[in-house]
Image: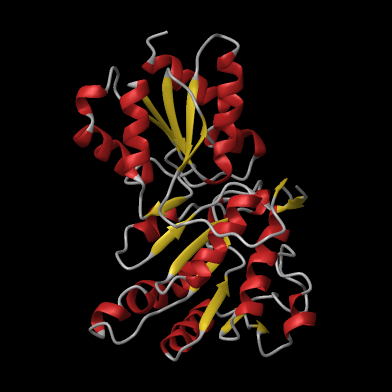
Amino acid sequence: MRTIQFREAIAEAMSEEMRRDESIYLMGEEVAEYNGAYKASKGMLDEFGPDRVLDTPISELGFAGVGVGSAMNGNRPIIEFMTFNFSLVGIDQIINNAAKMRQMSGGQFNIPIVFRGPTASAGQLAATHSQAFESWYANCPGLKVVVPSNPYDAKGLLKSAIRDNDPVIFMESEQMYGDKGEVPEGEYTLPLGVAEVKQEGKDVTIVSFGKIIKEAFKAADALEKEGISCEIIDLRTVRPLDCDTILKSVKKTNRLVILEEAWPFGNVSTEITYQVQSQAFDYLDAPIEKINTADTPAPYSPVLLAEWLPNYEDVIKAVKKVLYK
């Protein structure tokens, strides 16, 4: 099987879907002439032309609104934010129009739109460019939230997101665009709302998603040398949340650690903690541990940033804590 970069998987997913359906188009800052800020739309302007790959002004509220209105009129837009930090400028269109229009219209309007771009930290980008918004958007009924961690999942999930008749928030990472992975050349999709057990284990369940899951794999490799077997679940989709896969694993391992790159208050790991303790309390042999960033804005200093972000050593400590080691 061939190996391609994450950015290439994203471009392939969009291009394949645009060849299949002429109502699909891509719009955002620098997506056309510049081939995308992270080259995730490279070559698409040449193939599809300026009517279907559109550069926009620096006006997220404006082009997010254009996308919503376009979706109401039968198109299937892909709206790229250069970073989801910038989506805050257009969040009114996402929350108050895209997410609610189907209900407010009594089902007369579907909103088949994908908002995609990078989320969370990406090195020394400081407080206003290092925020994770998965739990923010997952808090809103009417939206689906997808956060892939590798090129194979990214392509399959993005194709499904584009075909979905509801608005989908598709969150990537600047630090994953160069990651390489095996991706089939043939047609495939992956269902939204289905987590995957990436690694089988028997002693503890580790749940994560997005780029931070790499730290879980590093920790699991180190712990295996000490005779500790970790089961790793990649959520892939934050909303809808696949509780069944998590519960099945916890009932086997009896311990749960959740790793999420987000502030600790009211995040995705908080919801998972509630769901597991309410549905599988009797199976738990230790309190659930969740690992998040520090409860401060992201620092610029690389020394402070390393302390702010969760890492594999934090995972190792949490696993040993739930194992009483």
Looking at the figure, which quarter contains the C terminus? top left
Q: Is residue 91 visible?
A: yes
Instruction: Count all numbered tags in the image, as a single digit.
Output: 0
Residue drawn at x 69%, y 75% is 31
x then y, percent, for residue 36: 72, 70
Horizontal side of residue 242 vs 7, given as left or right: left
Query: Viewer-proximal residue, 182 or 95?
Result: 182
Query: Viewer-proximal residue, 303 or 313?
Result: 313
- Name the residue at the front extreme: 186
Horizontal side of residue 238 vs 277, given as left or right: right
What colour scheme was applied to this rendering of the protein?
secondary structure
x then y, percent, for residue 110: 37, 81
Residue drawn at x 42%, y 40% is 295
Q: Is residue 185 above or below residue 37?
A: above
Q: Is residue 288 visible?
A: no
x then y, percent, for residue 156: 57, 58
**Residue 279: quarter of image:** top left
x then y, percent, for residue 192: 44, 57
**Residue 44: quarter of image:** bottom right
Horizontal side of residue 245 vs 6, given as left or right: left
Query: Viewer-proximal residue, 309 or 203?
Result: 203
**Residue 119: quarter of image:** bottom right
Residue drawn at x 50%, y 27% is 200
